[in-house]
Amino acid sequence: MSDGSGGGSVRQRKKSSGDGTGSRARKSKTTGSTTSGSSPSAAQQHQMWARIVLMVGIAAIVYFTTFRTREKKFATQREVLELRTQPLDCSRPYLEEISKFAGCIPNRCGRFVSDKIVSPAEAGILLDLARAGFALGQSAGGASILDLHSGALSKGTQFVNVYRLPEAKQLFTSQHINVYRHVKAKVQQAVAENFRLSADALHLTHPTFFSRLTNATAKTIHDEYWHEHVDKETYNSFHYTTLLYLTDYGKDFTGGRFVFIDNEGKHNRTHVYIEPKRARVSGFTSGAENMHHVEQVTGGVRYAITISFTCDREYAMADPKFALDDDEDDQNAEERPAEP
């Protein structure tokens, strides 16, 4: 009997095992239980947010250590500088082009600033000339130019030829003429000395102009003076650029600093700034080694003169004559292109 009862029990277990329905039911019940509890608990949510904060923090650290912009003072308004220089390596395209012009190749590219090239009295006379010229026309967008060579004068959203305006006959005195030419010659000599050039190899080139900047909203692309740029890429004739400031940063206007952008490696940048000061002259090689921009003026009026030089005689231009009483010169002035 024990054998018979034992055998029946074995057959029952085998049948149950072969069916498998009980096992599947148990698995199904287990799975269903897991699904119904899939919503994260408060602890899990806390852990998830902690991970997000950690990742953002790491990303911020990587960003600010990889992409750095530093600021460096080159010339402040309070300083009185005999001469300050910063040598730089020439950009390859600039060096390749300028190497064609004997006597005009810099010993090294770079920039300089000085408060001793032009006198405050000379700057004051040129400021009077600029104000008189801009009294005849200004840009509607806050960036006005007066080019005494081409005659271009900002007016509204266009340019007019200042030499066609009857009022212009009263603008230019012999004192203005003499000071303008004398200042240009002194700046030219300063460029030659700082970059060890022959002064005769430098030629005044277009555009050379007065600028008047305010905080008015830009109306045309000509008013957007604050974009980063390279002079040689903007004006093909440029080899050396100079600026003579006629008003004082922090006194006559706010904002409007001149800023060089130096790239150190792939991501690191240094902004090297000049605070304008009456009679201050800055000069630099016009290649990509001196990318720059002017900060937007936030108040007041900023006056300056851009005086540009070329090594290529093909782009040379003469000093303006200002002789508006002479019919022949007046006709020639009228024919000059009114371009910025």
Image (tube, rainbow, N blue to C red):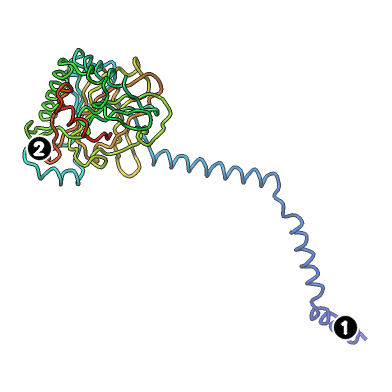
Towards the viewer: 275 or 270: 275
* Quarter occupied by residue 230: top left
| Disc 1 versus disc 2: nearer the observer | 2
Report the side of 195 relative to 120 (left or right): left
Amino acid beneath label 1:
Gly
Q: Position of residue 240 (x, y in %)?
A: 18, 34
Q: Position of residue 205 (x, y in %)?
A: 17, 34
Q: Distance between the residues labelled 1 and 2?
A: 115 Å
Q: Give the farthest residue toward the front.
A: 327
Label drawn at residue 55? none
* Quarter occupied by residue 202: top left
Residue 302 visible at all: yes
Mark 2, Cα crowd under 10 Å, few <14 / some 14-19 / many 20+, is many
Report the side of 239 relative to 304 (left or right): left
- Work out whether mark 1 precedes mark 2 in sequence or the reverse, and give the earlier one: 1
Towards the viewer: 33 or 83: 83
Residue 283 visible at all: no
Towards the viewer: 105 or 323: 323
Report the side of 61 relative to 330 (left or right): right
Label drawn at residue 104? 2
Q: Mark 1 points at which residue?
A: 6
Q: Where is residue 59 in the image (x, y as percent from the top left)?
A: 48, 43
Helix, strand or loop under label 1: helix
Total residue callouts:
2
Amino acid beneath label 2:
Cys
Instruction: Quarter of the image for the N terminus: give it.
Output: bottom right
Helix, strand or loop under label 2: loop
Instruction: Quarter of the image for the C terminus: give it.
Output: top left
